[in-house]
Amino acid sequence: MDKRVKNAEEAIAGIVDGMTLALGGFGLCGIPENTINALVKAKIMNLTCISNNAGVDDFGIGLMLQQKQVKKMISSYVGENAEFERQLLSGELDVELTPQGTLAEKLRAGGAGIPAFFTATGYGTEIAEGKECREIDGRWYVLENALKADFAIVKAWKGDHQGNLIYRGTARNFNPMVATAGKITIAEVEELVEPGELDPDMIHTQGIFVQRIFQGVNYEKRIEQRTVRKK
């Protein structure tokens, strides 16, 4: 099955106000920047975004926050975005902070059809407030519900027409879990190849999870925190 679409604008067809989106990436590494730019241009509003973080003020999900397109963020780390902080403290943005490993597992569980799971992370803290807790083998655990999205949006290094994806290095981060958690999954790739060109043993996301794929353009590949050695 050929799942190619022409560009990001065509890929986001069907995304409307009020939907829930899951977006891959960690910091500014492996984020679906072409698709995010298309969402900004389309001015789709009142979105719930599931993402490890919210980008920075002028890049990634930060661009959507600038346009007030996001009503709720389900995230783990949000410390690099001043506009995010401003909207949170002013009450403009609903935020659900989740431990990083728990967030990854909630997305994986959603993609695997597992409705909930117990984890020891967060027990005895504010994370556990209002949630079922259970003692198992002498240790206390918190029940966490899985996460699913109307659309999942990921960025990969290479992909083929059938939607098989390979991520490069640390850009792998949250993308494989996100790719499984959407009713419809959009993949943007740096290089789009013919079926059969990818080594089957190297594929990280199988095409069965992906409904739309396109080759992105003009990737910036920013470094969020550049550290250099003093001369």
Image (spheres, rainbow, N blue to C red):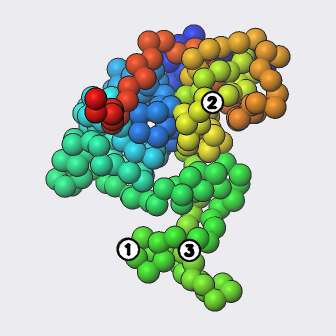
Q: Are marks 1 and 2 in contact (CB under 8 Å)?
A: no
* Residue 126 vertical placement versus 10 (above, below): below
* Residue bearing mark 1: 126
Q: Earlier in the sequence, mark 3 or mark 2?
A: 3
Identify the image quadrant of the C terminus: top left
Q: Which amino acid type is shown beneath numbered disc 3? A: Ala
* Residue bearing mark 3: 120
* Horizontal arrangement in the rendering, residue 25 relative to residue 165 (left or right): left
* Horizontal arrangement in the rendering, residue 109 relative to residue 31 (left or right): right
Q: Secondary structure at mark 3?
A: loop
* Horizontal arrangement in the rendering, residue 154 relative to residue 108 (left or right): left
- Residue 189, position in %: x, y? 58, 20
Q: Residue furthest bottom?
A: 138
* Residue 23 vertical placement versus 7 (above, below): below
Q: Earlier in the sequence, mark 1 or mark 2?
A: 1
Q: Secondary structure at mark 1?
A: helix
Mark 1 or 2: the one toward you: 2
Q: Which amino acid type is shown beneath numbered disc 1? A: Glu
Residue 137 appears in the figure: yes
Within-10-Å neighbours for mark 1: few <14, some 14–19, many 20+: few
* Horizontal arrangement in the rendering, residue 186 relative to residue 69 (left or right): right
Q: Which amino acid type is shown beneath numbered disc 2? A: Tyr
Within-10-Å neighbours for mark 2: few <14, some 14–19, many 20+: many
Separation of residues labelled 3 and 1 (CA atoms): 13 Å
* Residue bearing mark 2: 167
What residue is shown at x 71% (from left), y 12% (from top)?
Answer: 193
Q: Residue furthest front?
A: 231
Query: Residue 81, located in which quarter of the rendered image?
Result: top left
- Residue 65, position in %: x, y? 29, 37
